[in-house]
Image (cartoon, rainbow, N blue to C red):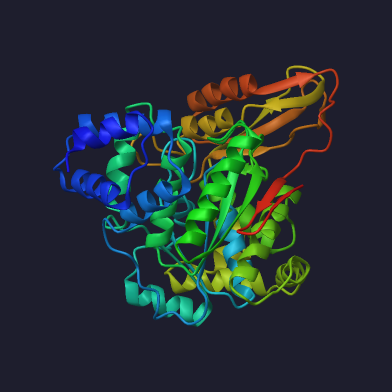
Amino acid sequence: MRMYDLIYKKKYGGKMTKEEIDYIVQGYTKGDIPDYQMSAFLMAVCLKGMDMEETTNLTLSMRDSGETLDLSKIEGIKVDKHSTGGVGDKTSLCLSAMVAACGVPVAKMSGRGLGHTGGTIDKLESIKGFSTSISGDEFFENVNRIKMAIMGQTADLAPADKKIYALRDVTATVDCIPLIASSIMSKKLASGADAIVLDVKMGSGAFMKKFDDALALADAMVKIGTNAGKHTSAVITNMDQPLGLAIGNALEVIEAIDLLKGKEPKDLMEDCIALGTLMLIGGEVAKTHDEAEKMLIKTIEDGSALKKFAEFVEAQGGDPEYVYNTDMFEKAQYVDPIPAPASGYITHIQTDEIGMCSLILGGGRETKESVIDLSVGLILNKKLGDRVEKGEPLAYIHSNDKAKTAAATERFLNAYTISDSYEGGEVKTIYARVTADSIEKY
């Protein structure tokens, strides 16, 4: 087998066999295939596409390029959730506790943030003492005991994806659904969960800007997971504005805890319910969406989800008092309003730019070596469709540097559009639910 022949085949739309895909993935991971040939192949895939069988085989080959986690030591049906990334997305924090409180084991591997999207691990580390650097045995023991644990991703998990993604990032081959789907699902399948629920973001703060593209990605990932023998489903959710009101590490953890106390932002709760119902069905503790929704809401009403989150924090070295008294979180030195420059209605938010504001303040990483400030960020006061008067705060900036406050304020104002009227109608949080059997649009 020659890489030249395989590039030529895909260049003219030929279908790759499993053996050919394995040859390419294994060869590139080992270093036998050079970057320039792999780049040519990736571009051919972008231009000619892959069918479902090819995409599944690519995913499985990437999954098998390194270690896969064996979660058989954990009792019950293990469920995992993955988000394609967004601004203010703290869903994993509150949702995992709600699902665990319903008796479904949540064994989750998460990463750190890079760029304007926050990482779950960074957020959790704003709790004094909390650590995701736990051993495999501790991870298994915690899930068995309290039904919930979150640990950092291992470098040996799907190493082919890490290497291929780095190449895609510099060769304009990122925006290709077969490559995106295989990248995400190779890591999820290697993580060992029995059921996988996907949160596919759509809008100005997401990679997928249009519904049809988000639906195609969700459908592809659900089919890959199903073909691999996993109970897989997806929800397409709104990222035309930040999720909730808080953007920034400690601020988002506080908002997640507030949700568990029943003080939820409406859109964050809707997101948790939509994803959580699928997790409970995948975990086989509920048969219908209505039954699952009632179970999730009960965990908020009876305080069991809040208690579960405190148990989880304590099990991983954190101070559980932070859960019951959020005033203990480190606070930024300055809190400044961003006054509206005019009266009117919020008609558009360039959500990724709001994420960049947090990055400017020091709440995100420009490189993997960057040290982040866990206390900084923004609290929104106005979102899509809201009426605002001139001078009224659009948001509040939490900062430790006045120069960064000024730079973030300017960028924030450029991200908000204020118009005389708003004709966008009700702002949706959920657009569609995708399962192996159906696509349900909302």
Q: Is residue 124 above or below residue 403?
A: below
Task: Give the farthest residue toward the left.
Answer: 32
Q: In this image, 276 relative to 113: left or right?
A: right
Q: Position of residue 328 (x, y in %)?
A: 56, 58
Between 13 and 168, the one nearer to me in the picture? 13
Callout count: 0
Image coordinates of residue 333 in percent, x first then y, are 53, 39
Judge whether residue 425 can be spotted in this image: yes
Residue 136 appears in which quarter of the rendering?
A: bottom left
Q: From what the image shows, is residue 15 above or below residue 67?
A: above
Rendered location of residue 37, percent (x, y): 22, 32
Horizontal relation, residue 44 to residue 211: left or right: left
Determine whether 335 is above or below 412 in the image.
below
Q: Quadrant of residue 13?
A: top left
Residue at point 17% right, 35% down? Answer: 34
- Camera-nearest residue between 304 and 156: 156
- Indicate left or right for 246 with 17 as reference: right
Q: Nearer the viewer, residue 166 or 342?
A: 166
Residue 301 x %, y %: 76, 70
Pick the quarter of the image with the N terminus. Answer: top left
Taking the spot 77% from the left edge, 22% from the top edge, the residue there is: 391
Can see residue 369?
Answer: no
- The residue drawn where x is 42% and y is 52% is 56
